[in-house]
């Protein structure tokens, strides 16, 4: 049976952020994720988690100037010190919130920097993060996005994720497998999921096209959820989608699974 968690950066966005925890719990979610907790003191978030009996599943490392269009800094030469400071901040929050996954967004590719330099920078930052997290129970995640939504994103597709993970060479670096991004980029989602299952640390879902509820579009999530269960995936399934007509009104798809 899949364990669904709510992405509070995408769901319940009509509510104040800290009020989204109660809404998610009321709708049957047992865990939450979001882009980052850094605008709030950890004590305030921990109170909402405890009050609503929710697990903090994962969040991203600080991703730079999000409002200004940045989507991670890990691949950007010259910002390694900023990356390391952000990592330490993320670890402090993860420890306070009992969070066991930190996702590293690689970032967008500048026009004036060669790809090889970007990848070398990313690999160096990931090695540092993996070494820093070694000996803790926090795993590091990397995620492939898609270039239809983000034309200059650094990591796309499972082959690139695998190659970068291989270069880093750390067992505590896992893949965040987002069915939406994989479908947009390459398709054949269940075959690649099965191949990568030993190194998958988290799953996210959304319908395609539109990135709406999982029961909308070309992906048969009833089949997918059964299959990932049959394949032995025991982790969380993050619901990271854009509701069509409000979060709670669109959760009929989940009722059969919780």
Image (cartoon, grey):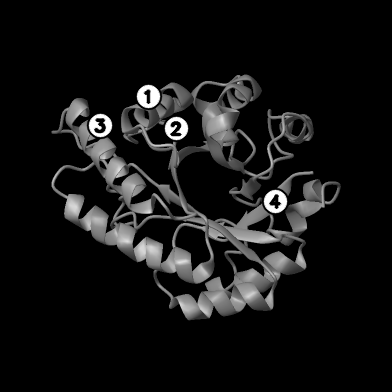
Taking 257 as reference, is 56 above or below it?
below
Q: Secondary structure beneath disc 3? A: helix
Taking 118 as reference, is 8 above or below it?
below
Between the C-alphas of marks 4 and 3, the distance is 32 Å
**Chain-order first, disc 3 or disc 1:** 3
**Residue 40 in the image, given as x and y percentages of width and height:** 43, 75
**Chain-order first, disc 2 or disc 4:** 4
| Residue at numbered disc 1 | 163
Q: Residues within 10 Å of mark 3 (few under 14, many from 20)?
A: many
Taking 145 as reference, is 39 above or below it?
below
Between the C-alphas of marks 3 and 1, the distance is 10 Å
Using the rendered image of the protein, determine whether residue 148 is visible from the camera's viewpoint: yes
Q: Residues within 10 Å of mark 1 (few under 14, many from 20)?
A: few
| Residue at numbered disc 2 | 146
The residue positioned 49% from the left and 80% from the top of the image is 43
**The N terminus sits in image quarter:** top right
The residue positioned 39% from the left and 49% from the top of the image is 134
Q: Residues within 10 Å of mark 4 (few under 14, many from 20)?
A: many
| Residue at numbered disc 3 | 119
Q: Quadrant of residue 149?
A: top left
| Residue at numbered disc 4 | 4
Which mark is nearer the camera, 1 or 2?
A: 1
**Residue 19 in the image, given as x and y percentages of width and height:** 61, 75
Which mark is nearer the camera, 3 or 2?
A: 3
Q: Nearer the viewer, residue 30 or 124?
A: 124
Cβ atoms under marks 3 and 1 closer than 8 Å:
no
Cβ atoms under marks 1 and 4 closer than 8 Å:
no
**Chain-order first, disc 1 or disc 4:** 4
Q: Secondary structure beneath disc 2? A: loop
Cβ atoms under marks 4 and 3 closer than 8 Å:
no
Between the C-alphas of marks 2 and 4, the distance is 23 Å
């Amino acid at each position: 049976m899949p364990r669904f968690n709510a992405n509070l950066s995408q769901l319940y966005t009509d509510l104040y952020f800290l009020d989204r925890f109660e809404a998610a719990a009321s709708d049957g979610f047992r865990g939450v994720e979001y882009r980052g907790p850094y605008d709030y003191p950890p004590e305030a978030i921990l109170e909402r988690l405890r009050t609503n009996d929710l697990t903090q599943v994962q969040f991203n490392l600080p991703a730079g100037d999000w409002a200004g269009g940045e989507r991670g800094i890990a691949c950007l030469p010259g910002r390694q010190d900023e990356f390391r400071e952000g990592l330490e901040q993320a670890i402090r929050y993860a420890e306070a919130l009992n969070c066991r996954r930190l996702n590293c967004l690689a970032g967008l590719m500048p026009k004036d920097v060669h790809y090889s330099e970007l990848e070398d920078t990313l690999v160096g930052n990931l090695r540092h993060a993996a070494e820093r997290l070694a000996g803790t129970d926090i795993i590091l995640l990397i995620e492939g996005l898609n270039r239809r939504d983000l034309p200059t994103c650094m990591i796309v597709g499972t082959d690139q994720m695998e190659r970068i993970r291989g270069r880093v060479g750390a067992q505590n670096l896992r893949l965040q497998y987002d069915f939406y991004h994989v479908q947009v980029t390459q398709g054949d989602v269940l075959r690649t999921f099965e191949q990568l299952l030993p190194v998958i640390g988290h799953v996210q879902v959304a319908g395609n096209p539109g990135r709406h509820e999982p029961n909308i579009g070309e992906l048969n999530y009833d089949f997918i959820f059964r299959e990932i269960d049959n394949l032995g995936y025991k982790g969380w399934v993050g619901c990271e989608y854009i509701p069509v007509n409000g979060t709670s009104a669109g959760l009929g798809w989940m009722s059969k699974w919780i």
